Image (cartoon, rainbow, N blue to C red):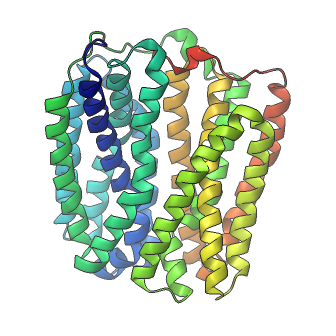
Amino acid sequence: MSTNTSAWTRWSALAALTGCVFTVGTAEYVMVGLLPTLSAGLRVPVPTAGLLVSWYALTVAVGGPLVTALTLRLPRKALLLALLVVFAGANAVAAVATGFGMLVAARMVTALTHSTSFAVAIVLAVGMVPPARRGQAIAVVAAGGNLATVLGAPLGTWLGQTYGWRTTFWAIVALSALMFAAVAALTARPAEEASGPSRAELATLRQRRVVTLLGIIVVSQAGLFAFYTYLSPFLGLRGFSPRTVTLLLAILGAGALAGNFTGGRLADRAPWGSLSATILALAGALAALALAGRLRATTVVTVLVLGVVMGALIPLLQERALAAAPTAPTLITATSASAFNLGIAGGSWLGGHALDAGLDLAYLPWTGIPAVLAALPLTVYAARAHRSDPRPADHLVRVN
């Protein structure tokens, strides 16, 4: 699509791409709310059901970059449409799964489309706008992920609790079909297709400061998801009804959306200090949830705080990753996405293993705190290595 097309055409196409990210994000995040329903429906323990989160994230972390590399030379629009077909098909298989193993396999196929779908949506979005507005286009499309946590996951959880978990997957299939039609009708093939990363860009990822930032992402997310994966059953243990749990997930999502904007502002002003403070705040929020006992009011407030903190952490980590590799912004963005999902997979496995070992669900927040705090010395080390590092310049928003 030419950058000279009308504003209405561009924004309609951007909305379609945002909807794609929203759909794919919803399919990932909704599993947290569906775990109790899936556990009961498939007659597997909650920690076993939690493997759906672990395997999905691990597949995104490992398989996502491979799929992206293998499809780099394909036409972007055709590739996104093909990915949506695979995504819809895998969710349809999940909806009719007759056993846990079949559901895991369907989820892993879905996960293989995750990273590439997001990357292609960004490439298409950037091709629609003038260079001066590329950052704005990226932000609009990426907002689909935030909307998935605020709107998609709570609605999907409500559908699953009210009409059965299979209904949620069928709803995702229907939404995928709608997004397929929107992308086909509203977007056009970009004038220039993306090329593969250069050797210089690949070498950037081996630098110590980049590896350190990726390590911060992995351990902080592992600490968070050791608990967050099992948030729904944890809230159920606190006496909240399934419908109230859905409302609390929406509150957490709203907090995350607000935290996202806050984290972006903090990244502009004092990135390293803000990152360290946010990591400490995350550990504090987890501790507060464990100490709240059955005080429902305290739990509600702490869930909101947790949402704000986890939302703020994401742009802070992403901004620092970009600062660590200013010559390879696209590649570091893709690699940091893998690091996020590697941390999610490790954290959900850690939490499930702790529960299998006999840990009471009420004490699960303590499991993730050591991993979260392990990110602090890494952050201090990285801050010293980047002591003279300025705020990333405009070239960081280019898609190479």
Closer to us: 13 or 213: 13
x, y percent for residue 176: 20, 48
x, y percent for residue 294: 64, 89
Closer to us: 307 or 377: 307
Q: Residue at x 16, y 46 (%)?
A: 178
Q: Give the number of marks.
A: 0
The quadrant the N terminus occupies is top left
- Picture quadrant where residue 373 is located: bottom right
Q: Residue at x 37, y 12 (%)?
A: 195
Is residue 18 toward the left or the right of residue 383 in the image?
A: left
Residue 336 in view: yes
Residue 358 in view: no
x, y percent for residue 122: 38, 28
Is residue 328 toward the left or the right of residue 388 in the image?
A: left
Q: Residue at x 59, y 63 (%)?
A: 226
Closer to us: 156 or 186: 186
- Picture quadrant where residue 181 is located: top left
Is residue 22 toward the left or the right of residue 77 in the image?
A: right
- Residue 66 vertical position relative to residue 156 in the rendered view, above or below: above
Q: Residue at x 79, y 50 (%)?
A: 277
- Residue 252 vertical position relative to residue 239 in the rendered view, above or below: above
